[in-house]
Image (tube, rainbow, N blue to C red):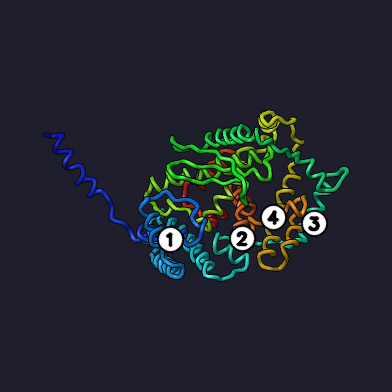
Amino acid sequence: MIRYALAALAPLALVAAAPAPTELDKIAEAFVHLTLEAGEREAGYVDAFYGPEEWAKAAKANPRDVATLAKDADTLQAKLAALDPKALTPDERRRRTFLTGQLRAAQTRLAMMQGKKFKFVDEAEGLFGVRPDLKPLTYYDGLLARIDTMLPGKGSLGERVGAYKAAAVVPKDKLDPVIRAAIDECRTRTVRYITMPANEKFDLEFVTGKSWSGYNWYKGNAHSLIQVNTDQGVTVDHAITLGCHEGYPGHHALNARLEDKLTKGKGWVEFSVYPLYSPQSFLAEGSANAGVKLAFPGTEQADFERKILFPLAGLARGGAAANPALDAALEELKLAALTIDQQYLDGEITRDAAAVLLAKYAFTTPAAAALGLPFVEQYRSYVINYSLGERMVTAALNRGGADAAMRWQRMERLISEPTVPADLTQ
């Protein structure tokens, strides 16, 4: 009798314990529906969704038109603004701030879908929550001169930089073991500091015909599909970049942690959908790039490549002597591409001129540089998320002379909480 009585009361207890949705909960759910329907109006708008299947089906069956979505995004933003911060818990205030940025991005992108043109920096700020401060190319000319003095020797500067990097293309029949070994090492180094869900896993696939070099398609339930594009060849050092960026502590780790801690742990449905054009991408790409040096500080990447990856690739062991000052200068030089991309997308220079300039600052040929322009043309101001995002995340991780343990703790919080770009400067 006791068993039956408890069984009968259990459903009632569960119903009674379920809290009524708050206004913030309602706005969050409406945001998810709006995002899914915007994804039906623009291919690629939704990068991942692992919420209720019926929500995705409803969006596909009857999506609102873009003009209506834009109007409804404005309404949701107004409702968020009307919430009294004093009536919210600290957690709710962070959630509100996150949703405000996500909705501002939706407003910006929906305006673009209707034909509105933004200047590069305005578009970036609207979509990703950061207004890039772009240096003139003359600044990078000075950086080229500095690199020239730091790397003496024969041949052009491009040839000397190429020799210093000692990049080696992995034969295609060796790609699978090399990439898997790289990802495994990235995971090993990450899980020393960051706990992953017990069921987390990824599938690896090699593809061609893409504008990107690697992509993480998050499927939900701590499962990712990691794709590697083999069109332009994958170098040994890039295998590590892909392993950290797409896997650990990059996109796979971030998505799995957010799903576990926020979607499941707190019931925050807005984290079940990932709109590509949003501040979430600035944090995702920035942390994924910063994760490489976090996982492989100092000469550890070169050491691992020399000991493990080069032999797996069947290549002569490489790895030049470390030169931190030169590495820092080469890293800063990557920001020149943002200035060139801005000039090209704003119509200040032609496509051919953009390829020539990109070649100059990346030590390659115009033909090779042009291969990267389809990505810029497709994703536009999204390009700020990589180099600028990396710089801001790295600065946040290192602030105050933090040691390795503190840097990893900061990364764990960044990929597990409703972080926004403004948090990186606090």
Please tell me which residue lies in front, 279 or 211.
211
Q: Residue at x 57, y 43 (%)?
A: 227
Total residue callouts: 4
Image point (61%, 32%), residue name: 177
Q: Is residue 111 left or right of residue 61?
A: right
Name the residue tied to disc 3.
142
Q: Earlier in the sequence, mark 2 or mark 4?
A: 4
Determine the residue positioned at 70% across, 29% down.
314
Give the Cα separation between the discs numbered 2 and 3: 27 Å
The earlier-in-sequence mark between 3 and 4 is 3
Compared across the picture, whether 37 is left or right of 296 comes to left
Of badges 3 and 4, the one in the foreground is 4
Q: What is the CA distance from the residue labelled 1 to the residue labelled 2?
A: 22 Å
Image check: 128 left or right of 170?
left
Three-letter amino acid code of the residue under disc 1: Glu
Q: Residues within 10 Å of mark 2 (few under 14, many from 20)?
A: some
Is 189 placed above or below 50 here? above
**In-front residue for pair 275/144:** 275
Q: Which residue is mark 1?
A: 37
Mark nearer the viewer, 2 or 3: 2
Q: Secondary structure at mark 3?
A: helix
Looking at the picture, which amino acid does disc 3 mark? Gly
**Residue holding disc 4:** 335
On the rendered image, what quadrant is the C terminus found in?
bottom right
Q: Position of residue 395 (x, y in %)?
A: 62, 50
What kind of residue is marked 4? Leu
* The image quarter in which residue 80 lies: bottom left
Q: Which residue is mark 2?
A: 380
Residues at marks 2 and 4, CA–CA distance in whole angstroms: 15 Å
